[in-house]
Amino acid sequence: MLEGSSTYQSFVAMQLEDDQEITTELITEEPPVPSEPFEGSRLDRIHESQLLRVCYFSDSLPFAFVNAQNHLVGFDVAMAHELAKELQVELAFIRVERAQLAGHLNGGTCDIAMSGFAATPERTRDHRMSVPYRKLTLAFAVPDYYRRNFSTWEQIGERAVNLGVPDVPYFVELIRRRLPNAELTPVSSPRPFFRGEVQEVDALVTAAESASAWTLIYPSYTIVVPEPGRIKVPAAYPMPHGADDLVRYVDAWILLEESSGTIEQLFDLWILGQASKDREPRWSVLHNVLHWGEEKAEVPPAPPESDPDTGSGPVPDATGEG
């Protein structure tokens, strides 16, 4: 089991499997949101242009991030490669802001978003959702010294806490029902919390599978899944309204990828950190960081310039975000 800086280095060095890579374009400067909705068949456009346009977010570790070689990688990036291979087309990844996703999807900037997106009821108003491809675990990201105060829902409810919550009504109401006395602060990205830029927030409501990757970069934080009862949230791929042909195609593809074991293999690689060929652990979100069933080892803090998602210092970032 890798720990400390070796764990971090193993994480940022991860690459796509050799047989996954196809011709890819990476667009890191967000284009203007189209003023008019796209008309016509999305599936026809994909085949005619020989290009699948995929939107992604810059803050969605480990689903999409820039590695030490300046390549866009991650669980959903690998899934996008698999989808493009199935469609027999090339790939374009387009970085967008979460708040602008609906406009980019419905206007034709991209055909699908693949970036660790939670499927919630209100989000179906803005775009179509695929069938779920994975269920994510609701958790709290907390400073390591504070983790024991979040072991159970009862413990959390006994304290006056300020919780950062994704700026999505479903999550706000879910936490309000569970913790009626907590102060809730909507957040649009996990990055400011992990950088210590929101001092008033005690903990961040997040998905364990996602935020645990952040704790590889910021090891003074840890992930806690309070008991009793783990809450699962489905992850799905947003697509444009009216793209019924594409939605049907992607739904069938997800079911086949699930049946063939491809999704499980990619989850093992990108979330559990197990290489697909030798199955040896490289790093592990759920074991090295989440530590279900074991105590967290003390690790030295990573240098602040080593954030692969922001791309400063020794780890370059194709996104260009500072």
Image: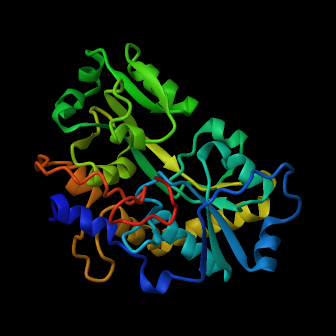
Residue at x 38% of width, y 58% of height: 312
Vertical position of residue 17 compared to residue 180: above or below: below
Vertical position of residue 10 compared to residue 100: above or below: below
x and y, in percent, of residue 20 in the image: 49, 81
Left or right of 233? Residue 68 is left
Nearest the camera: 190 or 302?
302
Left or right of 78? Residue 37 is right
x and y, in percent, of residue 242 in the image: 81, 54
Nearest the camera: 276 or 107?
107
| Residue 280 visible within the image | yes
Nearest the camera: 322 or 128?
322
Left or right of 146? Residue 262 is right
How many marks do you count on the picture?
0
Nearest the camera: 305 or 277?
305
Q: Quadrant of residue 28?
A: bottom right
Left or right of 201? Residue 20 is right
x and y, in percent, of residue 38 in the image: 85, 57
Residue at x 34% of width, y 61% of height: 313
**Which quadrant does the N terminus fall into?**
bottom left
Residue at x 24% of width, y 29% of height: 150
Vertical position of residue 168 compared to residue 190: above or below: above
x and y, in percent, of residue 310 in the image: 43, 55
